[in-house]
Amino acid sequence: MGIFTRFSDIVSSNINSMLDKAEDPEKMIKMMIREMEDTLVELKSSCAGVIAERKKLNRKLEEMQSRERLWGERAELAVDKGRDDLAREALIEKRRFAELVEALRAEISDHGGLIDQYREDIGELEERLNSAKEKKRMLIQRHKRANGKKRAQEDIRRMDSVETMARFEGLERRIDQMEAEADMVNFGKKPTLDEQFDDLKSDDDIENELAKMKAAKYTAEKKSDE
């Protein structure tokens, strides 16, 4: 399992917890990006630590290799001088440092593999982070539109509810009552003298107009008969 995968499990755990709590999607997106950024910082910091440790091991390896060569040279010198006893001691020391060299090389190789894994995980996370940032604005806009649509649908359902319709019917009945009361204001009231004369004048105007229409029709018919 990669290092990033282990960090990713932590991120996924946090996100799943937010989903279970039905958190605001905008807040979730921002938190996901923040989690990824924090993870990226941790990965780079850890990778830098491993690189520093490998450099330290490389310096130690050079030192052990130098000591191995030194004891090899001393063993040769002792042989040249006919000191087999010192040559044996020098060869023992040379072998000890040779074993340390091999152990250091193995450790350095392990550090190299770890650094490669860190670099791979960092590259993967950076790619995901860039993709998340590109999608962030679009997802937030979609969330806002969805919220607006949801509120509109809820308003429509409230307008269609029995309670709302009952309120409209009550208002309609109240307006009908007000109109009826307005009509009753002058209901049964005896017209004034001025109003009666106005009515007579109105009747005369209508009768005169009717007489003119009949006369015009009679004249037209008479001309057609001739």
Image (spheres, rainbow, N blue to C red):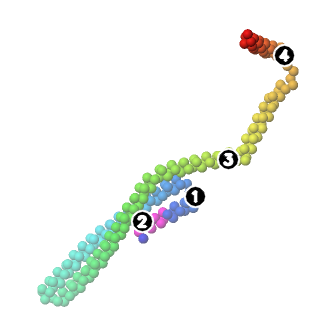
Name the residue beneath numbered marker 2. Answer: 4
Disc 3 from disc 2: Cα separation? 49 Å
Q: Earlier in the sequence, mark 1 or mark 4?
A: 1
- Indicate the amino acid at tag 1: Ala
Residue with the mark numbered 1: 22
Q: How far apart are marks 4 and 2 (CA)?
A: 101 Å
Q: Closer to the camera, 48 or 10?
A: 10
Splitting the image into 4 quarters, where does residue 223 fall?
top right
Q: What element carries label 2?
A: helix
Number of residues whose C-alpha sits closer than 10 Å to that of mark 4, classed few (under 14), some (14–19) or many (20 or more): few
Tell me, yes or no, whether the two marked residues, 3 and 4, touch with CB atoms within 8 Å.
no
Q: What residue type is labelled 4?
A: Gln
Query: Can residue 204 be seen at all in this image of the molecule?
Result: yes
Where is residue 203 drawn, in percent x and y? Answer: 81, 15
Q: Mark 4 points at which residue?
A: 196
Q: Nearer the viewer, residue 52 or 151?
A: 151
**Within the image, what quadrant is residue 129 found in?**
bottom left
Answer with left or right where residue 39 lies relative to residue 167.
Answer: left
Which corner quadrant holds the C terminus? Answer: top right
What separation in Å lies between label 3 and label 1 (alpha carbons)? 24 Å
Residue, x 14% and y 83% (percent of image)? 77
Q: Give the range drawn in magenta.
A: 2-11
Q: Which of marks 3 and 4 is in front?
A: 4
Q: Main secondary structure of the magenta part?
A: helix
Please determine whether, in this image, residue 220 is positioned above or below residue 17: above
Q: Where is residue 75 drawn, in percent x and y?
A: 18, 84
Reading the image, the residue beneath label 3 is: 158
Identity, as a three-letter code, of the amino acid under mark 2? Phe
